[in-house]
Image (cartoon, rainbow, N blue to C red):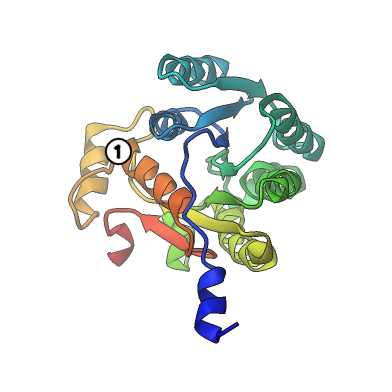
Amino acid sequence: MPAATAARSKITCAMTLADKVVLITGTKRIGGVVARELARRGAHLALSYNRSRDEADEAAAMVRMMGRRAEAFRANLSEEQDCQLLVDEVGARFGRLDALINMASVYSSTPFDALDPAAWHRALAVDLHATFFCSRAAVPHMRKSGGGRIVNFTDWVARSGRPRYLGFTAYYVAKAGIIALTEALALELAKDNILVNAIAPGPIVPPPGTSEEELKEVADATPLGRWGGEQEIAKAVVSLIETDFITGETIRVDGGRHLK
């Protein structure tokens, strides 16, 4: 076979979301918007939660109203066993798993002097370890379908390559680890047509309790001069699921915040 013909024979079509099964870990706030956009493109959604059951049920109901299948699953992703059970239950209930979006995260500040071993392990359990354990559990299901997509979530600060805020040592280390994990998994799983990428959000939606002064301060520090909104994350997720030739990348969605 000529080299050019052989090369063309390896080209595959980009993933379309119609009737694909997507698992989103963590559906509070941004996750619900992502679920809606995926359902709009024809995907069925499995949504995991730990304490935010109302938000997960609301997102699932919205997906079902759009004519797609959706179920909510409770899982404590700080436990390795729960990660495995969650993914396997989704695979069993839906019959397949095509994409995994590791959104679950714990964002909290702990002063360095209070960062004892328990606090350290607690912070890394969800923000880093759960991403690995859920991904590891998802791979066999994706291999059965001939490939898949994994989208991880890090942070614009970790993507910038240096810490900026005091009190977030464990969080920063975990999110920096997500970038390394994304690259390593992308290399390991390329042969299985499983593409692995990450999103590094910046000022998307303000945390509850953010003051008007804080809102303005963040907007002023962002070159585009505003907060992004959940829809910008949904757009990035869709693009990383539908791509067929981007893997091992971490994409900042931060309005240029890292430039200042």
| Quadrant assignment for the N terminus | bottom right
Residue 139 placement (x, y as % from top left): 71, 49
How many C-alpha atoms fall within 10 Å of the one at disc 1: few (<14), some, or many (≥20)? some
**Please, which residue is most extreme toward the right here?**
81
The answer to which quarter of the image holds residue 255 is bottom left
**Please, which residue is most extreme toward the bottom here?**
2
Q: Which residue was labeled with disc 1? A: 229
Residue 220 placement (x, y as % from top left): 19, 51
The answer to which quarter of the image holds residue 157 is bottom left
Q: Residue at x 70, y 43 (%)?
A: 134
- Can you say whether 146 is above or below 188 in the image? above
Q: Residue at x 71, y 51 (%)?
A: 143
Judging depth in this view, the residue of 190 and 187 nearest the camera is 190
Residue 224 placement (x, y as % from top left): 19, 54
| Quadrant assignment for the C terminus | bottom left
The answer to which quarter of the image holds residue 259 is bottom left
Q: Secondary structure at mark 1?
A: loop
Q: Residue at x 20, y 42 (%)?
A: 216
